[in-house]
Structure formats: structure tokens, C-alpha cells
Amino acid sequence: MKLRYQNRIELLQGTLDLLILQTLRWGPSHGYGISQAIRANSGEILQVDTGSLYPALHRLERQKWIRAEWKLSENNQRVRLYHLTPAGKKQLASERSRWEQLQEAIGGILNPGAEESEP
Amino acid sequence: MRFLLWRKRRQAEMNEEIQSHLEMAVRDRMDRGEAAAEARAAAHREFGNAAVVREVTRDQWGWTRLENLCRDLHGGLRLLYKSPGFTIVAILTLALGIGANTAIFGVVDAVLLRPLPFRNSSRLVWATERFAFNHGSAGVISPDFTAWQEHNRVFEEIGASSGGVGANLTGVGQAARVSITNVTVSFFPMLGVRPILGRLFAPQEGRLGREHVALLSETLWRNQFGADSRVLGRTIQLDGAGYTVVGVMPASLRPSADLWTPFAINEARFSPQSPAWAILTVVGRLKPHVDIAKAQSDLLVITHQMDNQYPPQAVTFRAQETVEVIPLQEFLVHNVRPLLLLLLGATGLVLLIACVNVANLLLCRSAGRAREMAVRASLGAGRGRLVRQSLTEDLLLAATGGGFGGLVGFWGTTILRQLIPPTISVDIHLDLRSLAFSTAISALAVLVFGLGPALTASRTDFCEALKDGPLRLGAGRTARRLRTLLCASEIALSLVLLVGASLLARSLLRLSEVPLGFDPHGLLISTVQRPLTLSNPAEYPGFFQNALERIQSLPTVEDAALISQYPFGPPHNGSLRLNIQGAEQVSPPQGFRVTDISAGYFRTMRTRLLKGRVFGDADTGDAQPVVIMNEVLARMIFNDRNPIGRQVSFIPSAKTWMTVVGVVSAVRSDSLEEEPGPEMFLPYLQEPSFSMTFVLRTESDPHMLAGTVREVIHQMDKNQPVTDVATLDDVIAATIAPRRFNAMLLGIFAALALILTAVGIYGVVAYSCSQRTHEFGLRIALGAARRQVLRMLLSESARMALGGAAIGLVAALGLTRLMSSMVYGISAHDPLTLIAVALLLLLVALVGAYIPARRAMRVDPMVALRHE
């Protein structure tokens, strides 16, 4: 069972980190908020599994790309808010460019003629 | 500690984080108009398995491995604690197996394997001559030693010692009897031993006139001289002669003695023409590239060359001389080797049985836990995690067993240390290597038999396991067959041990029934050895006669007598009285004891007189010399003719004719095992001896007389020590003490094996019964009589026992042959013993099976059928 989750983390690893970091760029948020934001912003396509989300959050925190603090929410509930750190911002930039390279490369493979026809 | 606190806080935070996540999700859903209960259920469903989320998230914190180990250990401890029966049996089994093995191996290692504590000890050899007389006993005649020393081409160094000399040490505190070993000045430098104080003998101290120097043992130095370092240079009195102390030797030196003095190589003791040769123990260091065979042949040539230098009387006994050379270590351990190997074998078997038993227990337990495994797997425990948990538990078991095994080993070592004869130079301590080895062996067994089922269980589809109820896993034919096989091998191993133990026990019994030829109960002995340097040996008998009369007059003493060498006492040195001359010049084919006794000796000992008379008060030094023979010697010399009135004399000093006046029944006096040998008795008044033993008989407890002789002697001469004070019963018991210890130890091991086997059989049958409740219920419901079910179970157990016993008997027949030297009075293949032991095991197997089987028989078919 645990194995199954771990497989998915690996599959999504780079991407999920990127999505989390990107989501936090708009402001601090908690785990539930992040999952809802990703879901809403992807037009309900990407559903982030909690079994992937929380390990990813704790891993990013350990790498000091995000930091967490306990705050009271608007409903007067204690929530764990995650902030993007300066290191996290740098990481986001590099992950973003890496993602774009990947996208380009995959795009090139999927549409071999595209580049020639553009100009 | 801080780590644990941090961890706890972190855990609480994570729980709160997840909780808040869920609550927000529920609130959102309710905001969208869902009902509260529905929203809660949907949020939980969406969230997934919170336990797994927690676990995978925790994995990101690091430290997981350590934490898992802690949790496994904790869980393992809890499980072991929850099934105390299983745990106690398993740990006890392992502890006994490991402990016994460790203790015995420690001794075997120290005695047989580790090199002697001497310089370059692997090249040290013991060399001896053997002559036809005296059972071919070993020893080098002093003139031959000097020849070896001068002419050999095989030794780098050679030295000799001669023990068994005693002297009265006077002038320091209370007079004491001390043992002196004479050594050549080369002896200690060759061994490479150093004094803890002072120096060794100088080369010139091996010359006549310079030899009055002595080395003290550390023990004597502490007891008699108060460990005073000013003892160096002091002069001590040995039998009235002065010796200067030059050094103190360490207590660890073996063979031990109280004192060492140098051999003076002089004409009197080292010339072939002298009658006063010494019998020596010779040790040499082989030159490089010289082997034992070469040394042996070289020395034999030298010995042969010496033959013609001896007087004509010596020719007879030198006719078939041989020379033997063996490594020193082998020489020192030869009498304990078979014993140690036997014990090692026995403990090895016990360890094996212990492993088999634990394996069986583990197999049963793992089968019983299949359902637990399945539940845990379905709750999300990974397979690796399950196996790891199992493994931790098993290792915990093995480690605890090893720990207790160390304790058992420590006690065992303490006991065994006292068993090893003092002649062997060893330092026995608990051997950590062998503890590690035995623990590793049992850990391996535990792992193999614990891990196998764990792997199988974790591989199975847990849904099936849950559906099927608790009893399917491990109940397969293979598992059952394996358990039966393990039980059968336990029976086989136990049988071997039991046969060995019974053979030893029966030998001991036979020995205690051996007729001694005298009545040892109620006898006390005390030995008095007069100084050898006393100017006139003719004064000895007067002193002893005087003392004997005083002792006989004491009211507590019923009877008292004197003998020069008491039965079962120290072995007497090979005497050079080789032949006896009757009217027809017959010589007995073997050496015989010559013992000096007082007139009342046979009466005191209650030895039967067969012919003629015993010595009387009239047989004094001035009267006609007389002798008494035992029946063995009389038959040897005179066959069936009447020896009474015949005249005999000793050949080397064929001056006086002695008349045979009596024949007494033979008495065992060397060991219980040996048939009585030929023996001749002389009246001590006619044959003065410096050393006599008082034998006192009393109706009450002979221990009460212990101080009597000392008091009487002290009144007569305050410088005269009294030694060897003991009851004769104790002396005889001491001669068979190693044998008794041996039998007892093997008996304990065998009993242990028997108990383990019974537990093993019980476990297997009980388990198999619980597995087959359904089957029994069905059988009974279909009309089978309960007795038939019982019979079925018992016959299964009996088949297993018979199979095991058959294998065990074959093994026992092979192995007991190695024990034949330790068996007395019965055959090592004694059929009665073999059959009795096999029957005993069969009985144990049936009883072990009957108890659980009877329980199974009582099963209510309705309950049994509903069981699953």
C-alpha cells in the first residue's frame, strides 16, 4: 500500500514540487488550500492526493524552500501555513525553466514538423 | 531523549494539520449544501488513508530507520511479554544450549587448542624411554639422560625434571611437608619461564656441592614466608639440610611444586654402575626441520649404545626398551582430552537440540500468527516491514538467549575450572569468541526458522488468509512434515546423549560395587614422613613404633596400624626391585608392589588371610626375615603349590632369605578400575621406611580423629609435619571424582535433552491438534469412536518416535565406541542400555502426545464443526 503511494510521488515529484511552489507564490497557504488551488487552477483536472501532498510539503520544508507557521484562519481554526522562502523562489525559477525545457523537448518529439513550419 | 520529544511534538503537529485539512474540507462541502454526515464521510474518503499519509509523511523527516527499529524492538518485546510460555521456554532453551557450549568450549580451547605458556612451545616435546617392567611405564633413567644430553643431534635444548620428592621444611613458622621438584639448570631457561623475584639457577649450580639453592613457588612464598622479598639469600632447612633461596616462581607455573632445587649431575645418581638412578621426565626443544620420528630414532640409537655400560642385572629389563617422543602439549593433556571431547560433543548435541526446539516453537507460533500478519498487511503494512518486524523479534529472542547463555557459561566455567587437574597449565576463562559463536549459531537457527514462515506469510494474499480463518497458514503438509522431522531428529539426538549418560552412570555403579578386598568405612589415614637426612635409618622404626603405641592406647581409636604406601594413595615410584628368587629362580612377569606394614595392619583393614599367619610382635628387626604375599603374587610365582615356608629374596640385594609366612586376599590399591596387582608385604621393623601412614579405625565418624595423629606426633617432635589426613572413603571417592563429575554432567545434558524433546513433542502434537479440530469433529460426527482418534494421534507420535529412535540408535552405536575407554564393566554397545533408553524415549513421546491428544478427543463435534 505504502509502496503504491511512493510510486506516485516519484512519478509526480518534480511536477508536484513545481506546482506547490508556484501556488505559494501567490501567498502563504495551508495544505488543504494548496490542494484546492491546484485543483481549481487546473480546471479540476489535477487532483493532488494527500498521500503525495503532505510528504512533498514536509520534504520542501526540510529543504528550506518553504517554511511553516501556525496561524489562526478566518474561521478561528489553527492551521499550518506554508510560506515561500527566498531559496524557494530561486528553486521555483530553476524548476520552471527546467519544466519549460522538458515541455519543449517533449513537444518537439510529439510534433516533429512544428518547428520548421513556424517561421 | 530530545529526539523523542521533538518527534512527539512533530507528530502532534502533523495530526493537527491533517485534522484541520479535514475540517476545512467538510466546511467547504457543507457550504456547498451537503448534509453534515455526508460531507464528513466524503471528506474522509477524499482524503484517503490517514494512517498511510502519516506514515509516508513521517518518512520525509529522516530518522525513520532508527524509529522503525525502536518500534520493532518495542513491539517484539511486547509480543514476547504477551506469550510468556513460549518466551521462557525458548530463551531458557537457548540459554542452556549456548551457555553449556560456551563453558565447555572455553575449557577445550584453553586446554587443547591454545599454545602452552612457554617460549616457542610448538617445538617442545616430551621424550621418554619405556622398559618391559612395570607395565612399560614411562620415564628416563638418569644415566641415559646424560647420554641424550651429550650425544643427541635433534634438540636445540634439553632439560629434565624429577618430581615426587618431599621434604620437611623447618625453621620458618610451623613445620610443613613440601613437594620438591628437581630440575636441571637448563630446564627453566628452555621453557622460557621467569621468576617473579630473584633469579633462576646458574649453570654452575648444577654441579655437586653447589646445588644447595632453591626456588620457591609463589604460593609457598605467600603462605610460609608472608610474601617477604627479603627471603632472597635466606637459608631454609629441607629435611635438616640448608638451601639458599635464590628466587620465587609464579603461581601459574605448571606442573606445580612447592620448591625447585637443581639436579647435581653426579656419579652417584647419573652413572650406569650406581644403583641409585633417578627416573626423569625429559623435555626438549626440537631443532628446526627435525620431526618427531627423527628425534625418536636418534634417541633410541643413543639408548641402545648405553646398554653395555649397565651392570648385567639390567640387561633383562633393557632388552625391549623403546623410546617415545610426543609434543609436550599432548603429553600434558592426554588424560583430559577424551573427557573434554566427550563433553564438547555432548554440549554440541544439546545446542543442536535447543536450536531444533526453538525452530519448532517458532514454526508453530508463526503459523498461529498468520492471521495477525494478514490483518497488519491489510492495514497497510509493507511486506518488508512485516518481515523486518519478524526478524527483529527473532533476533531479540536470540540475543536474550545469548545473554542468559553468557551467565550460564560463566557459572559453568567456574565449575569446570575446578575439574581440570592441576598438572595442566591453563588459564580458563569465559571465552567471548565461543559465546559469540554459539549465539550466532542459535541466532541463525532462529532466523532461518523464524524468517521462512514470515516470508511465506507476507507473500500470501491476505484477503484469502482473513477469509479462511486463522488456521490455514502453516498447516500445510510441508510445514507439518518439517515439524515432525525436527521432532524425530530431537529424539535421535536425545537418544545419543541418554545412551552416553547411562553408560557412564552404569559404569560408576559397577565401580562402586567393586570388591576392594578391605573395608574402607570408618578408616582415617595420616602420613608422617621423616627427614631423609636423618643419620640413621634404623631410627625410623623406633619413632613410628612409639607413635603407634601412643595412638593405639587412645580411647577413641578402636584399632590402628602402619603402612608405607596406603591404598589409592600417591603412585609410588618405580622400584628397582625387579626379580624375586624362589627355589627355582622364577621371576614374575610384571613389577610388583613392596609394602611395609605393622603387625596389625590386616586386622585394621579387615583384609582376609587366606593361608598361614599374619605378622606378629615377634617379627622384629632381629628375628628371622618374613614376608606375606597377596594371592596374585603367590599364584604368579608358586602356581598351585603351597608358598608357606618357601624362601625368597630380592635380586639386586640378594643377601637375606625371607620366609613366606602368609597369603592374603588381593586388595585394589591403584585404582578401582584396575584388577589388583601382585603385592608383597614386609614387617616395617625389618624393612625401615622413612615414610609411614597411620591407619586408624573407629566406630564413630573417622573425621573426628583428624587431629589425633598430629597431636601425638607434635608431642614427640615439634618439627615433624603430618600430611594427607583424610578418611579412606574420601580418598577412594576422590579417585573417581572426575568420572562422577563426567557422568553427572552428561546426565544433566541428557536430562536437558529429554525435557527439551518432551516439550518439542508436546508442542507439535498440541499444535497439530488445534489445527485439526475440524477434522476430528468431522470424524467423530461421522461415527469414529473417540478412542480411535486418540489412537490415531498416539500412533502418529509413536511412528515419529520410532523413526527418531532408529536413527539415534545407529548414531549411538557409532559414537559410543569413542567412549569405550570411559566405560567400566559393561560394553559400550550394551543392548540393555540401548533398549531401555529407546523405550524411555518412546514413553516420553507417547506421554507428550497423550496430554494434548486427550484434550482433542474430548472435542464436541458440533463445536468443532462450527470452529471455522
Image (cartoon, rainbow, N blue to C red):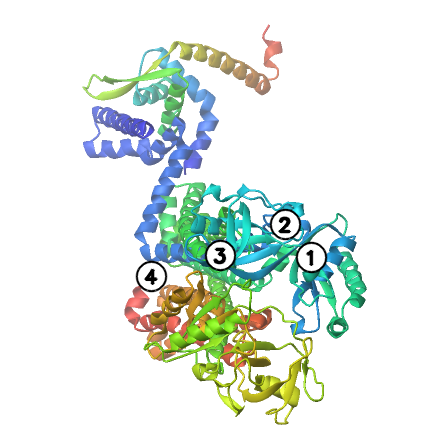
For image coordinates 41% across by 77% down, the residue present is: B549
Do callouts 1 and 3 mark residues in contact (Cβ within 8 Å)? no
Determine which quarter of the picture holds residue B22. top left
Do callouts 4 and 1 mark residues in contact (Cβ within 8 Å)? no
- For marks 4 and 3, give the CA distance: 87 Å
Q: Looking at the rendered structure, which numbered label has been put on residue B169?
A: 3
Mark 4 / mark 3, whichever is N-terminal: 3
Disc 3 crowd, CA 10 A, few/some/many (<14, 14-19, 20+): many
Dot 3 lies on which element?
strand
Quarter in which the C terminus of chain B is drawn: bottom left
- For marks 4 and 1, give the CA distance: 96 Å
- For marks 1 and 3, give the CA distance: 24 Å
Q: Looking at the rendered structure, which numbered label has been put on residue B868?
A: 4
Residue type at tag 2: Arg
Of residues B473 and B539, the one nearer the viewer is: B539
Residue at label 1?
B266
